[in-house]
Image (spheres, helix red, strand yellow):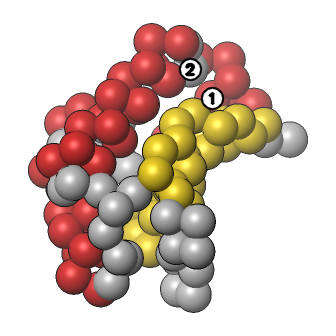
Amino acid sequence: MASREKLYERPFKRALDDQLKAEILQMFQSKRQMLPSGVEMKWHPKDPILILRGPMGVAFYVHFYEARKFMEVYVELGFMARQFVTEAHRSQAKDVVHQIAEDLSL
């Protein structure tokens, strides 16, 4: 069974529209070298959630709560991922998300 934990949170300043969604996805694509190979990135079809799925059952969910002007990032780790993902990996993931938020003035 997968475990889920909050990795990062912060308020955001910009309205989440289609243009900003495209910019966020593009920024994650530009940071691909900092992500494991084979990471799939897509927006949830209905909710303002960016989903990044990686190898070994690792998934990141970036939730944008527009009413509260707040974003939260959760990581979901499958059994294999729990065996290999370290605090250094978590820290690197937080740094990538934080840098993207700063670069886009979120």
Residue 61 visible at all = yes
Q: Residue at x 19, y 68 (%)?
A: 23
Q: Residue at x 58, y 65 (%)?
A: 68
Name the residue that disc number 2 marks.
Answer: 85
- At label 2, counting other C-alpha atoms closer than 10 Å, the crowd grade (few under 14, some 14-19, many 20 or more) is few
Residue 3 placement: quadrant = top right
* Image coords of residue 16 (percent x, y): 37, 76
Q: Residue at x 46, y 51 (%)?
A: 11
Residue 58 visible at all = no
Front-lying residue, 5 or 15: 15
- Name which residue type carries label 2: Val
Residue 98 placement: quadrant = top left
Q: Is residue 4 above or below residue 86?
A: below
Q: Give the structural element (helix, strand or loop) at label 1.
A: helix
So how many labels did they put on this image?
2
Which numbered marker is on residue 92? none
- At label 1, counting other C-alpha atoms closer than 10 Å, the crowd grade (few under 14, some 14-19, many 20 or more) is some
Asked if the residue under mark 2 is in contact with the one under mark 1, i.e. CB atoms within 8 Å, the reply is yes
Front-lying residue, 47 or 71: 71
- Name which residue type carries label 1: Ala
Q: Is residue 73 above or below residue 27?
A: above
Front-lying residue, 64 or 79: 64
* Image coords of residue 25 (percent x, y): 27, 65
Name the residue that disc number 1 marks.
Answer: 81
- Image quarter where the N terminus lies is top right
Q: Is residue 52 above or below residue 78?
A: below
